[in-house]
Image: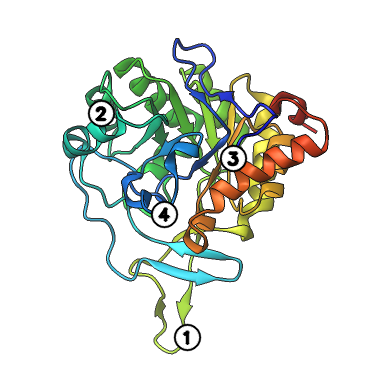
Amino acid sequence: MEHSARLDVALAPNKPSRLLLQNPVMPASGTFGYGTEYGDLVDIRRLGAVVTKGVTLLPWEGNPQPRIWETAAGVLNSVGLENIGVEAVVRDKAPLWATWDVPVIVNVAGHSIEEYAEVANMLDMVDGVAGLEVNISCPNVAHGGLEFGTTPETASRVTAAVRSATALPLVVKLSPNVSDVVSIALAVVAAGADAVCLINTLRGMAIDVDTGRSRLGTPSGGLSGPAIKPVALHMVHSVAHAVDVPVVGCGGISTAEDAVEFIMAGATAVQVGTATFTDASSMLDIIDGIAAFMEQHDLTSLDELRRVV
């Protein structure tokens, strides 16, 4: 669908590529596979970008089943970053991404700071990879990203290591499971992040009262969906006031109105996750809905919508 309002945004305005997106809507990491899985369900060319599931140095099997449990207004997941490893991504996925007109941002995770840097280095200069999203905030991986995203010091160290390993644009995804997300956002920007993304899932759990056991294969997981939207919106608003780089809003976005709220709160772009599980075309509806809202209110660019209220 053609839109008269300009929807394009830059996630790395100071980089040569600027990581330019034709619109501000993209999938949240872990909800869209490597992008290839949704090719028959969604016109990927219409998205602002594709964000892949987390990629690690070696293949990860992920967590034991069950991995998903539906909650009131949300979903608990404990997938555990199951992925094929960076070598297979470079060999099997990147050549296809290079044929797409949509930028692909690869989410990067690891057990150690050195692993993050090595994965980033292996993805550097790979045709088909437009940028990296550094996952320092995964609450459902034992010894995984969460520990790196909980303090400004460790978050800064991971970001600096990845920054030194690649020239690609860097988006750092932040955890909501912290006492002061603004200080962590400032730390990763100072260490070289071109943009920040928030929020990742909230820590949560569910118990089967008949067995007394967790509903997941692990004791706890990550809560996503509409239930976390007010928390995400508040944190995006707080960080957007504090940093001078683009903010990508994520958490409970299901409709165009949700996306508009995040943009008004200061987000440059948004990610959609859980909503895609119930309606594969939700991102396309959100893109069209943002454009319709802007046209209805005589707005010609997203900068006019972004108010940082």
The quarter of the image holding the N terminus is top right
> Closer to us: mark 4 or mark 3?
3
First reached walking from the N terminus: tag 2 or tag 3: 3
Q: Earlier in the sequence, mark 4 or mark 3?
A: 3
Comparing labels 3 and 1, the label whose residue is closer to the camera: 3
Marker disc for residue 254: none
Amino acid type of the residue tagged 2 in the rendering: Glu
**Residue 41 image label:** 4
The mark found on residue 1 in the picture is 3
Classify 10 Å Cα crowding around label 2: few (below 14), some (14-19), many (20 and above). Answer: some
Where in the figure is residue 123, as x and y percent of width and height? 26, 26
Q: Amino acid at mark 3?
A: Met
- Disc 4 + disc 3, Cβ < 8 Å: no
> At x 45% / y 70%, what residue is drawn?
69
Q: Which residue is mark 2?
A: 114
Q: Secondary structure at mark 2?
A: helix
